[in-house]
Amino acid sequence: MTPPTLAHVACPDAHGGHRMAYWQWGDAAAPHLVVCTHGLSRQGRDFDVLARALLARAAAQGQALRVVCPDVVGRGESDWLKDPMGYQFPTYVGDMLVLLNTLQAQAPIATFDWVGTSMGGLIGMTLAGMPDLPLPAPLHRLVLNDVGPVIEWQALERIGQYLGKAGTFDSVEAAAARMREISAGFGPHSDEQWLALSRPMLRPVPGGGWRMHYDPAIAVPYGALTQQSAADGEAALWQLYDRVQAETLVIRGADSDLLSPATAQAMAARGPRPRVVEFAGVGHAPTLVAADQVATVLDFLLPAP
């Protein structure tokens, strides 16, 4: 299958603007758009397996499909911000609106779906839960991958222990081994699958070695988070969630420390009343690489006619 193309959009900020990168798969003129958005320290190539599977399913159904996987600012091929305090949701949501309006100008969007892992899910929930946002089309289907309105504090503490502190590595294999150690919640993967997930996470260092792909300063606003401020944000997130009109699927790693069983159960009973699917042997967060995870998303986004 043809690899994705890399493009950028220019996004405004208080310091002269920045560019956000995105990876585009499939038919750039297709009226059906699926946006896949990654977690806090990840990047858009996380969705390579899912994007290929979506395009294959769409082709089998005789449909044209466009899959776009952004690198949220500060990650991947996107610019790093001059002010690290910009690494927060208002920036991320604003950048996504720029991206969506750019894609709409390139080819009209008739059907708009969103797959979001962790942070990417919260961005999607915001887009879906704020009815006055200038979206090119209403959000049709929403996948929330191991995230909801309540973020468990112990998971935030765990992530804070490594965020922005990776340093440099002598080889891709050494870096992949370290990422595997801190990402045990991703569940079992073959060595080949793990290397495929790891290579886009690394950048060469002048003089030798490898570093993580993201700006270490994304940890600055994250480090300012307190247990009280996290708890205070829950009411606002529930308000967003309860306004979601999109058909919604919630995916949960059965061992997740970020999305609790109680929160998933509460989500199923209110707002868009989603179907909740759990995957055994996985924590935070399912990578949507395993065949059963991919099939669940395909059946939701591209059901059999």
Image: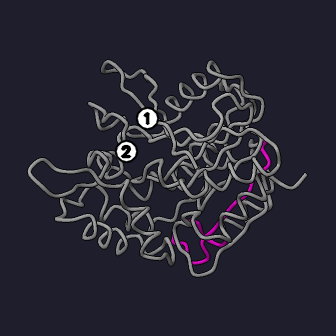
Q: Nearer the viewer, residue 47 or 147?
A: 47
Which region of the structure is painted magenta?
Answer: 245-261
Q: CA distance from mark 2 to mark 1?
A: 8 Å
Q: Amino acid at mark 1?
A: Ala
Q: Residue 249: say if magenta.
A: yes
Element class at badge 1: strand
Give the residue at mark 1: 21
Q: Position of residue 234 (x, y in %)?
A: 58, 52
Cβ–Cβ below 8 Å for labels 2 and 1? yes
Q: Is residue 246 left or right of residue 134?
A: right
Quarter residue 144 falls in: bottom right
Q: Is residue 305 above or below residue 95?
A: below
Q: Amino acid at mark 2?
A: Gly
Give the answer, above or below, for where 41 lies relative to 246: below
Question: Relative to 251, does residue 11 appear above or below in the rendering?
Answer: above
**Residue beneath label 2, please?**
76
Identify the residue at horizontal 62%, vertical 40% (top origin): 126
Instruction: Measuring from the top left, give residue 258's x and y in whole percent.
Output: 52, 66
For the residue pair 220 and 116, the one nearer the viewer reads as 116
Residue 10, position as x, y percentages in the image: 43, 22
Q: Please tell me how many numbered marks the rendered image carries.
A: 2
Local packing at callout 1 (Cα closer than 10 Å; few below 14, some 14-19, many 20+) is many
User: Which element is circle 2 on?
Assistant: loop
Of residues 21 and 73, the one nearer the viewer is 21
Determine which of the numbered discs, if any, sits on residue 117 in the image: none
Q: Residue at x 72, y 68 (%)?
A: 277
Give the residue displayed 66% in from the left and 56% down from the top. 53
Q: Position of residue 232 (x, y in %)?
A: 52, 50
Nearer the N terminus, badge 2 or badge 1?
A: 1
